[in-house]
């Protein structure tokens, strides 16, 4: 598990946000632009863990910022995603700790600590019940991204 430096992995804004859509950014791996784009304007962190990359992107909207978390495979193809955010709420991403083997601890919104665990195999996931408030993700009954929120 390691924080990937910007020299190896970064993003480039390719479509700015407007009233109709959020910003889109292109992945750049080892100075080579990829076709893959992700929603978000600011790369907050990229972490290599297990057989995946976890990419944290924020929207850079001062009054209503969201954090998009992506799980990419070893070839940088999107495998899974989730978003943390709420209407009229904003947050500031702070990476707190990398806990082996596959846990990322960070702050964003809500005044507490977020814990994201990447599991080696898919785990059962119940939509609308398994995630804390402010977390949204595409519909699915399994996940490798388990997220928890704890107040201090």
Image: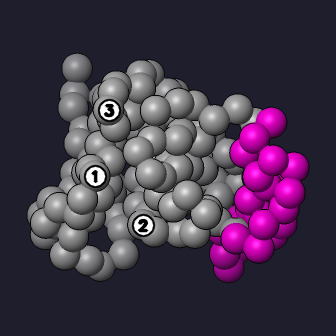
Q: Quadrant of residue 23?
A: bottom right
In this view, the residue in front, 129 or 71, is 71
Q: Secondary structure at mark 1?
A: strand
Question: Which residue occupies 42% across, 66% down?
Answer: 80
**Magenta region:** 7-36
Q: Quadrant of residue 82?
A: bottom left
Please provide percent x and percent y for residue 81.
44, 64
Residue linked to disc 3 = 101
In this view, the residue in front, 37 or 49, is 49
- Residue 88 in sight: no
Residue 129 to residue 10: above or below: below
Residue linked to disc 2 = 80
Question: Which residue occupies 44% across, 51% down?
Answer: 51
Please provide percent x and percent y for residue 126.
13, 69
Residue 124 to residue 5: above or below: below
Mark 3 packing: few (<14 Cα in 10 Å), some, or many (20+)?
Answer: few
Please provide percent x and percent y for residue 111.
34, 29
Question: Which residue occupies 52% across, 41% down?
Answer: 48
CA separation in Å, label 3 and label 2: 19 Å
In the drawing, does residue 139 fall left or right of residue 70?
A: left
Please provide percent x and percent y for residue 32.
86, 57
Q: Secondary structure at mark 3?
A: loop
Residue linked to disc 1 = 120
Question: Which residue occupies 71% across, 54% down?
Answer: 41
* Magenta stretch contains residue 65: no
Marks 2/1 in contact by CB < 8 Å: the verdict is: no
Q: Quadrant of residue 45?
A: top right
CA separation in Å, label 3 and label 1: 10 Å
* Magenta stretch contains residue 23: yes
Dot 3 or dot 1: first in sequence order is 3
């Amino acid at each position: 598990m390691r924080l990937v430096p910007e020299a190896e992995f970064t993003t480039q804004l390719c479509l700015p946000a407007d009233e109709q859509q959020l910003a889109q950014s292109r992945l750049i791996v080892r100075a080579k632009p990829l076709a893959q784009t992700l929603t978000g304007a600011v790369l907050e962190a990229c972490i290599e863990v297990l057989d995946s990359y976890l990419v944290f992107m924020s929207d850079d909207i001062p009054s209503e910022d969201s954090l998009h978390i992506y799980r990419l495979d070893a070839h940088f193809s999107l495998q899974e995603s989730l978003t943390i955010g709420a209407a009229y709420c904003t947050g500031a991403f702070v990476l707190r700790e990398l806990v082996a083997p596959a846990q990322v601890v960070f702050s964003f919104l809500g005044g507490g600590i977020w814990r994201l665990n990447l599991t080696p195999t898919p785990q059962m996931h119940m939509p609308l019940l398994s995630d804390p408030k402010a977390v949204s993700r595409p519909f699915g009954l399994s996940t490798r991204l388990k997220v928890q929120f704890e107040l201090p």
